[in-house]
Image (spheres, rainbow, N blue to C red):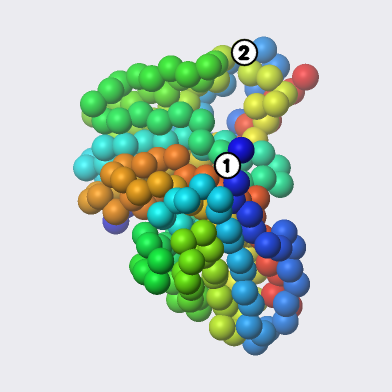
Amino acid sequence: DVKVTQSSRYLVKRTGEKVFLECVQDMDHENMFWYRQDPGLGLRLIYFSYDVKMKEKGDIPEGYSVSREKKERFSLILESASTNQTSMYLCASTTAGANTGELFFGEGSRLTVL
Amino acid sequence: GESVGLHLPTLSVQEGDNSIINCAYSNSASDYFIWYKQESGKGPQFIIDIRSNMDKRQGQRVTVLLNKTVKHLSLQIAATQPGDSAVYFCAETGSGNTGKLIFGQGTTLQVKP
């Protein structure tokens, strides 16, 4: 059974803290994505990666960075957390190729920044 | 800019009835569309997709309809069951071939027993 695993389901952090959200997939997928999900706004793409060491900005990259040192792992980093980064964060992966619509999502990490 | 939107944030249907969830998109160059289902506490899950050279595609109890003239996409669920209660998102690949998806805001489907 294919799986995308996000290390933390729930986190509570303080303003200014550095936050790491980890994501691991076991499907040997080339493409990995980080989205945030907010009520009324749907899913918005933060960053994505098509290969190891490679990263591309999504629609809302400000305040975030990412790391992809290994193919199976894609980390989202909040250098200095702020209250407006309180959200649900979703990691996804898919195989390489044109118009691949079937993203496999993790169960999400709900981050609260106080 | 590109945007994908759903007409209604919440849809309530009686168990056994058919459900229709609608979505409008703005990019006429989009050629691939997908529906996702997100159950409470879980990540979104792929339901069905359709390419722009098709008008209709059927799965198990679900049908997706694409009207390119008015840039409208719909998901029909036959004989809606309590397990269909979830948030449904439409998504498109937008312009270019980046592999990125643009998601709509989501419609919450509530199934009444």
Q: Chain of mark 2?
A: B
Residue B83 position, x and y percent, is: 70, 26
A11 sits left or right of A97 in the view: right
A112 sits left or right of B91 in the view: right
B81 sits left or right of A51 in the view: right
- Please state which amino acid type lies under the numbered disc 2: Ala
Q: Chain of mark 1?
A: A
Indicate the secondary structure of the residue bearing disc 1: loop
Q: Residues within 10 Å of mark 1 (few under 14, many from 20)?
A: few
Indicate the secondary structure of the residue bearing disc 2: loop
Q: B90 above or below A69?
A: above
Residue at point 56%, 39% (across, down): B45
Q: Which residue is mark 2?
A: B79
Where is residue B19, by image quadrant? top right
Q: B16 above or below B109?
A: above
- Please state which amino acid type lies under the numbered disc 1: Val
Residue in front for this viewpoint, A71 or B29: A71
**The N terminus of chain A lies in quadrant:** top right
Q: B87 above or below A87?
A: above
Where is residue B108, by image quadrant? top right
Query: Which labelled disc corresponds to residue B9?
Result: none
Query: Which labelled disc corresponds to residue A2?
Result: 1
Residue in front for this viewpoint, A51 or A32: A51
Query: Residue A5, can we see it?
Result: yes
Residue at point 69%, 75% (across, down): A113
Residue at point 35%, 49% (across, down): A96
**Labels 2, 1: one chain:** no
Residue at point 31%, 42% (across, down): A99
**The C terminus of chain A lies in quadrant:** bottom right
The Cα atoms of the two marked residues, 2 and 1, are separated by 29 Å
